Amino acid sequence: MYALRNTLVTREELQEAVKKLGAAISRDYAGQELVLVGILKGAAVFMADLMREISFPVAIDFMSVSSYGSSATTSGVITIKQDIDTDIRGKHVLLVEDLIDTGLTLQHLQQLFALREAASVRICTILSKPSRRIADIPIDYCGIEIPDEFVVGYGLDYAEQYRNLPEVWVVETGE
Ligand code: IMP
Ligand code: MG
């Protein structure tokens, strides 16, 4: 059983956070070649908003990873389902995520891009659940910190549903 419980982050709060992140990224990477790498499917909505808040031309790409475990948890074992096709060697990479929970997915991806000899690999997320962190990774650009609740909307799903909600909602998963 599951049902939407309440709105946790409004459209306005999301928009404001995205603007701030875009401004910081525009400032920090001015004059450099930047590739935004969005993690599918959840980061699709955030990516679309974020790229339009960056004040210089950027390249974008996407990859899809999966972690084994139930729909609401991450095991830390990650497989790449779909890889980028951009040559990122020597370029600055910014990994764009919907939500950082345990941090295991991003820790793995950061190591992967370092091995691929990116000039730098940083992390940008719209949402973060700091109380759930296992991997102590630096989050260079963090939008909004949220409590330990299961959330949907703004790209995030429960069983592939609700990604299209414009706000972030708390779901009662009954797990
Ligand atoms: P982690 O940081 O490796 O634990 O994985 C984070 C990923 O797990 C996110 O990008 C989401 O895809 C998924 N996830 C974690 N918490 C939630 C949630 O509350 N709602 C929907 N997806 C979640
Ligand atoms: Mg995700």
Image (spheres, rainbow, N blue to C red):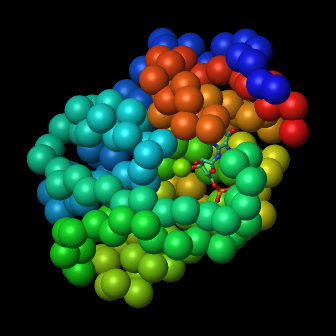
| Quarter occupied by residue 62 | bottom left
Residue 9 shown left or right of residue 55 in the figure = right
Q: Residue visible at 67% across and 65% down? A: 68
- Residue 30: percent from the left, percent from the top? 21, 52
Residue 58 shown left or right of residue 71 in the figure = left
Q: Residue visible at 87% across and 31% down? A: 174
- Residue 50: percent from the left, percent from the top? 33, 36
The quadrant in which the C terminus is found is top right
Residue closer to the observer: 62 or 131? 62
- Residue 134: percent from the left, percent from the top? 77, 64
Q: Residue visible at 52% across and 73% down? A: 79
Q: Is residue 134 above or below residue 50?
A: below
Q: Residue visible at 40% across and 76% down? A: 113
The quadrant in which the N terminus is found is top right
Residue 90 shown left or right of residue 18 in the figure = left
Q: Is residue 99 above or below residue 31?
A: above
Residue closer to the observer: 144 or 155? 155
From where the camera sits, is residue 142 visible? no
- Residue 75: percent from the left, percent from the top? 73, 66
Residue 55 shown left or right of residue 170 in the figure = left
From where the camera sits, is residue 64 visible? yes
Q: Is residue 39 above or below residue 84?
A: above
Residue lying at the far right of the rendered structure = 175
